[in-house]
Amino acid sequence: MTYGWAIALVVIIAAVLFALGIFDVSNFVGSKAAGFSGVAVTGWKFDTAGGFTMKVSNQVGQPITVSNISVTIGSNTSNVATPFDLATGEASATQTFSGFASQIAGSGYTAKVTIAYTDKNSGFDYTSTGTLTGKATA
């Protein structure tokens, strides 16, 4: 019975620490992009007011049209649905997203990004997804 209470106490403490963000990996790791293929994110910034900006780069090897970019941070999602063309190897202009909760400078975040694009030569639609981690900046 004593072991049962000890295990229950350890589980409760771990849950509290997790809820407080102690185990949030983004607090310990610098800026990192992972999971993208074809269309990559070349730079991004999440400011303390809740604004998110990023640039994407065409690494497909063919001209493409980016039709939609979706960014989710926490439970909030923002989209840029204005299509734009990218030549092979070209980087986009800065894409701006809003509607995210304000953050404290230096606090970690994880953004889930989905980029929908069309290969202009074949006409086929593709999706590049990945995650961006970093710390909010002023």
Image (cartoon, rainbow, N blue to C red):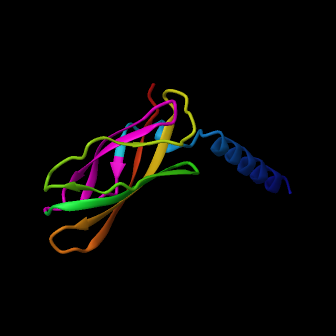
The x and y percentages for residue 110 are: 47, 46
Quarter occupied by the C terminus: top left
Residue 37 seen: no
Could you tell me which residue is drawn at 60 percent across and 40 percent down?
Answer: 21
Q: Residue 35 or 27: which is nearer the viewer? A: 35
Total count of labels: 0
Taking the image as shown, residue 61 lies to the left or right of residue 104, namely left
The x and y percentages for residue 45 are: 38, 36
Taking the image as shown, residue 61 lies to the left or right of residue 75, namely left
Quarter occupied by the N terminus: bottom right
Could you tell me which residue is drawn at 27 percent across and 53 percent down?
Answer: 40
Residue 109 seen: yes
The x and y percentages for residue 135 are: 45, 34
Q: Quadrant of residue 84?
A: bottom left
In the displayed structure, 57 sits above or below 105; it is below
In the displayed structure, 138 sits above or below 101; it is above
Could you tell me which residue is drawn at 45 percent across and 48 percent down?
Answer: 111
Single out the residue that lies furthest toward the front. 82
Q: Residue 117 or 111: which is nearer the viewer? A: 117
Q: Which residues are magenta?
A: 33-61
The answer to if 53 sits in the magenta stretch is: yes
The answer to if 60 sits in the magenta stretch is: yes
Could you tell me which residue is drawn at 22 percent across and 56 percent down?
Answer: 85
In the displayed structure, 116 sits above or below 20; it is below
Taking the image as shown, residue 2 lies to the left or right of residue 86, namely right
The x and y percentages for residue 28 are: 46, 37
Taking the image as shown, residue 1 lies to the left or right of residue 130, namely right
